[in-house]
Image (cartoon, helix red, strand yellow):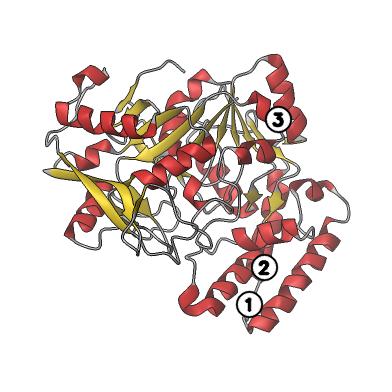
Amino acid sequence: MDVLLGLQWGDEGKGKIVDFIAPHYQVIARFQGGPNAGHTLNVNGLKHVLHQIPSGVFHPQIKNLIGNGVVLDLHTLKNEILHLARLGIDLTKNLYISKKAQLIIPTHRALDAASEQEKGDRKIGSTLRGIGPAYADKIARIGLRVGDLLQPDFKEKYNTLKNKHLEQLRFYQYPIDMAQEEEQFFEAAEFIQRYPLVDSEYFINDQLRKGSRILAEGAQGSLLDIDFGSYPFVTSSHTVVAGACIGLGVAPRYIGKVLGVFKAYCTRVGSGPFPTELNDSTGERLRQLGHEYGSTTGRPRRCGWLDLPALKYAIMINHTTELMMMKVDVLNGFEQINICTHYQLPDGTLTDRLPYSLSDIPVKPVYKTFVGWQCELKDLHSFDQLPAELAAYIHFIEQQTGVPITALSYGADRHCTLVKNSY
């Protein structure tokens, strides 16, 4: 089983890469996260954003699994399925949903909004999709799972959890009217039961025994991991490679390649530390050229130069075996391009390691400047065709990280992708 994940703060372009390499796999499995993730794919000139469905769905021969580590918004999932059905994609044959995946119920979203409101200036930038409260209920052992939909007492379990949430919402003094959202929830709960609800740990291990090639698809990015990210400005799940084992029920010994996806620069959505952020015309230029707006929320993404200490940290945590650099074309017109190689700490010392808390320890980025390639990238078939300046940029990253860059995206469409290896 290979694992593909993001090495920054999410939005790296994982969906495009999964769609591109998917034909080399028999199973694509999503192992964590919820509808706060948005994987954008451009297929046959059309843009698609998948929030919960694995990115292999545009290949009918591939089985797509939503694993136990995911938290599911059933109404969002229903709408995604109906959108794909209008494009002629029938997921009744190749979408499998873990019975152990946790459910997001309407009051989870209300709790998310109430909690953010209560934090005031200390907001973490939640997408308000109910992900955090759903994971909190999972850890507190009071959550609902997909398999509960099949039980005769599901409505009773639902009401018990809803009433707990309503007590919390009264504490927050957060008024809600759940009638319409509840109606949508139960309609979606009935709809989803048309699709195979499976014991996913058996499903995935049976596929491994058959010799199927499996790609585990991560959401968000490594720097948003609940333990290893820029806490507390993180998501609520394990976005690193170890999360694939827990989120699918697969032993570590089965992990093969670890494919790390990163942008040629950096972006971040929401609050939290961002050492190389550019709050100037250069940052705005990156945002406009890269169309850097959240695929789920539409929020403008914060933009900055590539951060090597953060990238090397993510590579270490994940034991990344191959790098895939995205959105290289965004930098086409820049005369100079910077890479942060070290941080300067408050006492003046330099380090290439992440401090315990970037939120509490201010760091100043130390940059190395590169000459830009200043040309359009078109019809590339080999890394040998790259401009010398871009080749130097790539070589420096490989040299510093010790990991080869084996894929390069220089445009939104599938064909604007260079790969060195056959997957």
Specify the amino acid type for callout 2: Thr
Mark in front: 1 vs 3:
3
Find disc 1 in the rendering and name its residue: 176
- Which of the marked residues, 3 or 2, is nearer the chain's N terminus? 2
> Contact, CB < 8 Å: mark 3 with mark 2?
no
Confirm whether residue 203 shows in the render: yes
Q: Which of 133 and 235 is in front in this view?
A: 235
Q: Nearer the viewer, residue 413 or 2?
A: 2
Percent position (x, y) of residue 158?
A: 79, 62
Extreme residue in the right direction:
152
Specify the amino acid type for callout 3: Ala
Find disc 3 in the rendering and name its residue: 251
Q: Quadrant of residue 379?
A: top left
> Contact, CB < 8 Å: mark 1 with mark 2?
yes
Left or right: 311 with respect to 370? right
Find disc 2 in the rendering and name its residue: 107
Left or right: 253 with respect to 362? right
Specify the amino acid type for callout 1: Ile
